[in-house]
Amino acid sequence: MYSAYIDMIRIRFLMMLAYRVNYYSGIIIYALNIGAYYFLWKAIYGTNEMLGGMTVAQITTYVAVSWMARAFYFNNLDREIANEIKDGSVAIQFIRPYNYIIVKMMQGLGEGIFRFFLFSVPGMFVISFLIPVKLPTDPEVWGVFLLMLFLSFLINSQINIITGLFAFFLENNEGMMRMKRVVVDLFSGLVVPMSFFPGWAEGILKLLPFQAITYLPGAVFTGKVSGSAVYQVFGVQLLWFVLLIVPLYLLWRGARTRLFVQGG
């Protein structure tokens, strides 16, 4: 059974490899996007050496690594699940000898591994020549960051799967999926780091899982969070991963009793 799940990762990786040219062009698009944010933040800082607890070098690195990390943890599992529910093909998954949710996670991981090696790594290499990115020199920081990046993928995938499963109850959850994407990008710290939000807003965001997707790994990578605090924020990620299993399980259990085919 476990070998079947591993095959899901391999198959999705090979599928993505067939369309690798799209991702090479995506590197250029991401580079332009990061460049625009770099000049925007540089203008915002002006003559200030520090804003929101981050220096110009840190915010520059944060922007670059956050967008390249997004290339790894981003996926469309919510849309895949919603489409399978609409056309009724999800019913076939119910009778197959594997767990549908785990299969989706493995497929997303295969896509993420492809994006990491053929998008994030070469993209970060290109960006480092275009803007002054300051990479950490401590191997331990790199190790913790990669672990946190994997947890970012898991948490983002959990949120995507939860959103997709709502199609069982709403029939059409297109609006929810679009809202989810905006909320994740904004509240995860991808567009604006959490430390730049007003104190009351930052306090609310710390009670939500979105910070565990982008802001916390980025803060560790840039050195904003260091020392023993690194393991505290790593623990926050682990906590959210465990907590999100509960609504995911409850939704999946309830969804299995509500399936009806809209298509044919």
Image (cartoon, grey):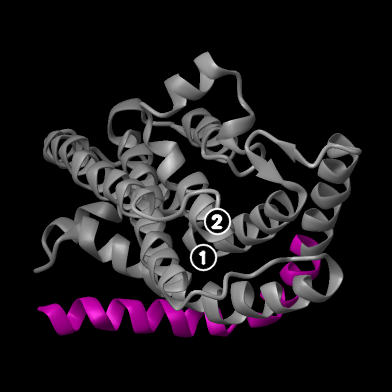
Horizontally, residue 38 falls left or right of residue 76, namely right
Mark number for residue 72? 1
Residue 2 part of the magenta segment: yes
* Amino acid at dot 1: Phe
Q: Disc 2 marks which residue?
A: 223
CA–CA distance in space, label 2 to label 1: 21 Å
Question: Which secondary structure lies at badge 2?
Answer: loop
The stretch of residues the image draws in magenta is: 1-30
The residue under the point 73% across, 68% down is: 26
Q: Position of residue 79 (x, y in %)?
A: 46, 48
The residue under the point 77% across, 70% down is: 127
Residue 13 seen from this side? yes
Q: Is residue 155 above or below residue 132?
A: above
Q: Position of residue 190 (x, y in %)?
A: 61, 44
The residue under the point 73% across, 39% down is: 50
Mark number for residue 157? none
* Amino acid at dot 2: Gly
Could you say which is closer to the camera, residue 69 or residue 137? 137
The quarter in which the N terminus is drawn is bottom left
